[in-house]
Image (tube, coloured by chain):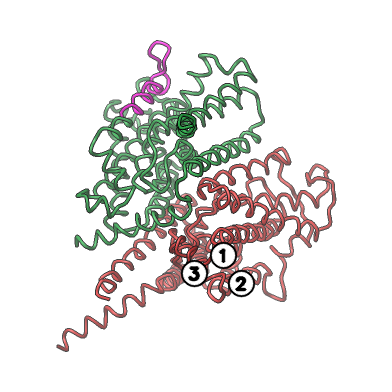
Amino acid sequence: MSTQTQPMDIRKCIPGLLNNLIWVLIVLVVAGFSIATNKFLRLETLSNILLHASVLGLLVVGQTLVFITGNFDLSAESTVGLSAFIGAWLILPARSPANGSGLMVPVFAAILIMLAVGSIVGWINGSLITRLRMNNFIVTLAMQIALRGIVLVINNGFPVFGTPSEFNWLGSGRIGPIPVAIIVVILAFVVGVVALHRTRFGRELYAIGSNSRAAKVAGVNTDRRIRQVYIASGVFAAIGGLVLAGQVSAVTTDLGQNMTFDIFAAAVIGGVSLNGGRGHMLGALGGVLLLSALGAGLNLINISPFWLDPARGLVILLAMLLDAQKTRFKLPAAATA
Amino acid sequence: MNDRRNLVHFLLDNMIWILLIVVVVIFSLLTNLFLTVNNVVGNILVDAAVLGIMVIGQSFTLITGNFDLSMESTLGIAAFLGAWLVAPAGSATHGSGFSVNIVISVAAMLAVGLVIGWVNGTLITRLKMNNFIATLAMLIVIRGTVLVTSDGHTISRLPGAFVGIGQAQIGFLPISVIVLIVAFAVAHFVMRYTVFGRDIYAVGGSVTAAYAAGIDPLRRTRQVYLASGVLAALSGWMLSARIGVAVPRLGQGMILEVFAAAVIGGISLNGGRGGMLGAFAGVLLMSSIDAGLNLMRVSSFWIQTVRGLVILLAMFLDAQKVRLSGRKSSLGSIVLKRDMAIQAPMKDGTAEL
C-alpha cells in the first residue's frame, strides 16, 4: 500500500507546479540567462526589462479584461498609435522638424484628449459589437486597419518629433531612482487585479465569459459590461501610447504596430483563455515579464537579430505545450470528481 | 406578404454579391478605366488569385472552427525554397545554382506546405494546444527561419518555367486566374458534395455531435491543416512567380486580409457556417476595392482607412442579416459554441486514451 501512496504524492505536486507554470518558467529563463551572460543579473538590465514590460503590460491589462468576457480587441495597437499621434500633433508647432499641427494645445489638455480618444475608440468597438451584433474579431480588426489609416492621413505620413518633457514624463521621467513608467504599470496591474478579482464587476466578467446566456439569466447586463471592457481596453491603450511616445519623445506613424501578437501571446502564456471565463490578472503579468525577459536576454547574448523571432516563437510554443499538458493532467481528476 | 419576405431573405443571403455589384457600379461611374478587360482581368482577378487560394485554405480551417494564422509564413517559406532551388547562384541572384527541374521544385514547395500543415495539426489535435496560439507561434518561427537562412537577401532571375503560373496567359486569361477559378470550383464541389465537406461542417457545428455521429473530428482537423498548408505553398509559388523574385518577407501581413475576405464572404469564425462561393465573392470584393481606389489615384494613406471602413460596413450589413432573419443573438451563441468546440475535443481525446 505504501508503494501506491508515493506516486500519488508526486502527482499531487504536478498540478501545483503546472498552475504556477508561468512563474516557474520565468525563474528558469532568468536562471538560464544569468548563467549564459553575467550582464543579465544587473540592476540596469532588470530595470530595462521592466521598462520594456511597461507598455506591453498596460495593453495586457486591458486585453485581459476583454479576453475574460470571451472577446478580442485587435484594435489596441492602433489605438496606441492614434492617441499618441493626436496628442503629440496637437502640442507641437507646424515647423518642419516637429511636423505638428501648430495648434499648440497645452500638454495637460492634449493628454486628456488622448484618453478621450482611447475611450471613444473603445466605446465604438463595444457599441458595434453589442448594439449592432457585429463579430468582435472583425470589428476590432477593421478598426485596427482604419485607425492606422487615420494616423497616416492626419499628417500625410510624416512622423512628429520633439515632444516636450512634460509630455514625456510618463515614459522617461523618474521619481527618485524609479522610472515613472514602472510605477504606472504596477498601478495598472493593481487596478486590474482589484477590478477583476475583488469586485462585482470582475465576477460578472467571468460569468459572461464562461456562459453569457447564463449570466444574462442571472441578471448581468452583459452588453453593458462588454462595452465597459472595450472602453477600459481603449483607455489603457491610450496610456500605453503616452508612455511609448514619451520613451522616444517622438511619434512615428507605425507606433505600436504589430504589438497585438505580443499582447495576445503574453496574456495566453499567462493562462488567460481565448475562450473567455478563465485566467488571472497576475498570470498575465507573468506572461508580460516572461516575454520581456526573453527579449532582453536574447539581445544580451549577442545572437543574430534574425534569430530573435524564431527563438521567441519557440519559447511561446514550449510554454503553450506545457500549458496544454495541464488540462491533460487535470482531466482524470475531474472525471472522478 | 410571403413573397416579400422571401425576397428580403434572398437579398440578405446574397448580400455579399449585392455589395460586390454596388462597389463595381460605383467605381464604374467614378472612372471609366474601371470596367475594362485590362482592369478586371489584369488587376482585379490577378490580384484575387493569390488571395483567393489562401482564402480557400483558411475557409477549410475556419469551417471546422479552427484558425490557421501560419499561412502567410508558409507562403513565404515555400516561395523562398522553390525560388532558391531554381535560381542561379551568385551574389546578385542568391539562388542555389542547382537549377533543379521545375517539377521537383514545385513538389518541394508543396511538401513544405504539407509538413507545416502536419505540424500544426499534430500540435493542435495530439498535443492539445490552442489552435490560435499554436499557429501564431508557427507564423513567427517560420518567418524567422526564412529571415535567418536568407540573411535578408532577395532571390531573383527565376526561370521562365517557374514564373509561368504568375505571368503567362492562355488566350486573354492569365494562368493564375484559371487556377483561381478551378480551385474555387473544386473547393465548392468538395464542400457541397463530398463526405469530407459534410464532415467538416459537422465538426465546426458541434464537435461532440460530430463525434457521436461517428466522425473522427481530430482526424478531420489534421486534414484541413494539411489542406491549408498545401494551398498556402501553392499561393507562395503563384505570388513569387507573379513578381518574379522571392523576398524574405513575402506575404507578411497578408493573413488579416485573408481573414477579412473569408469573413466578409460569410464564413463564420465560430465554425460550421459559410460556403466557398461566398468566400469567392469576399475575395473579389477586396480586390475590386483595392483596384478601384488605386485607379482613382487615392492616396495610399486613404486606401487603408477606406478598406477598414468597407470591412466594417460589410460586417454591419451581415450582422443585420442575423437580426432580420430572427436567429438568436449572435453573442450568446458564439460564446457557447466556441466553448464546446474547443473543450469537447480535449474530452474526446482523453476518452480515446
Quarter of the figure that contains the C terminus of chain A: bottom left
- Picture residue at 38% right of the left edge, 39% below the top: B59
Marks 1 and 2, the one that precedes in the sequence: 1
Q: Mark 3: which secondary structure?
A: helix
- Picture residue at 42% right of the left edge, 32% below the top: B278
Same-chain check, marks 3 and 2: yes
Would residue B179 be counted in the magenta stretch?
Answer: yes
The amino acid sitting under disc 2 is Val
Q: The chain drawn green is chain what?
A: B
Query: Mark 1 and mark 2: span between their CA atoms?
Result: 9 Å
Q: Mark 2: which secondary structure?
A: helix
User: Which of the chains bears the disc numbered 1?
Assistant: A
Region in magenta:
B164-186
Q: The chain drawn red is chain what?
A: A
Image position, residue B140 (x, y; %): 44, 50
- Picture residue at 41% right of the left edge, 22% below the top: B177
Q: Nearer the viewer, mark 3 or mark 2?
A: 2
